[in-house]
Image (cartoon, rainbow, N blue to C red):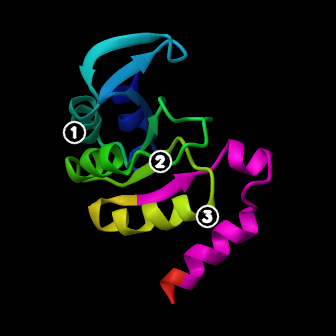
Amino acid sequence: LIEMACKHYPGRIIVAIDSRDDYVSVEGWTEATSTVAIDLAKRFEALGIIAIIYTDIGRDGMKTGPNTGAISRFAKNINIPVIAAGGIASIKDIDDLMPLEDDGVEGVIIGRALYDRSITLEEAIDRVRKRDR
């Protein structure tokens, strides 16, 4: 399916990989696999995916901070942009992710922290813009 989508819509497909302890999880995170997340990302990269949303499901929705080590390791091993997800709880977490841009992390998904107003979208955008000046 992914291969067909990449052929029909080149340069337009982004996929998500849900990972726990470096292994892919499926079926709504209930089923662990023996597939290493980085290996799957490399296969997707070869198909022409333009970016990958990488979710550390051990932290998603927990507001415990992102797993910067796992995110960095993942991003360094592929040559397409990574959008990090999972664990974002504060502006500090965004600050912690910004240095990973050099590793290939080009974005972040903020979920629960927006819903419960621990972070506002305006704060997050402002923080990134200030860094880019």
> Which residue is identified by label 2?
66
What secondary structure is marked by label 2?
A: loop
Label 2 to label 1: alpha-carbon separation: 27 Å
Question: Residue 121 sits in which quadrant?
Answer: bottom right
Occupied quadrant, residue 63: top right
Residue 121 in magenta?
yes
Residue drawn 19% across and 47% down? 77
CA gap, disc 2 and disc 3: 12 Å
- Percent coordinates x, y for residue 94 in the rendering: 53, 62
Q: How many marks?
A: 3
- Is 104 left, or right, of 67 in this rendering? left
- Of the pair 89 and 103, the residue shown nearer to us: 89
List the residue tagged with mark 3: 91
Specify the segment rendered in magenta: 106-130
| Residue 3 in the figure: left or right of residue 117 | left
Element on which disc 1 rests: helix
Residue tagged by mark 1? 46
Q: Position of residue 109 (x, y in %)?
A: 58, 49
- Rate crowding at label 1 as few (under 14), some (14 to 19) or many (20 or more) other CA atoms within 10 Å: few
State the residue at coordinates (78%, 45%).
Answer: 115
| Residue sitting at x 45%, y 63% | 96
Distance between mark 1 and mark 3 Cα atoms:
34 Å
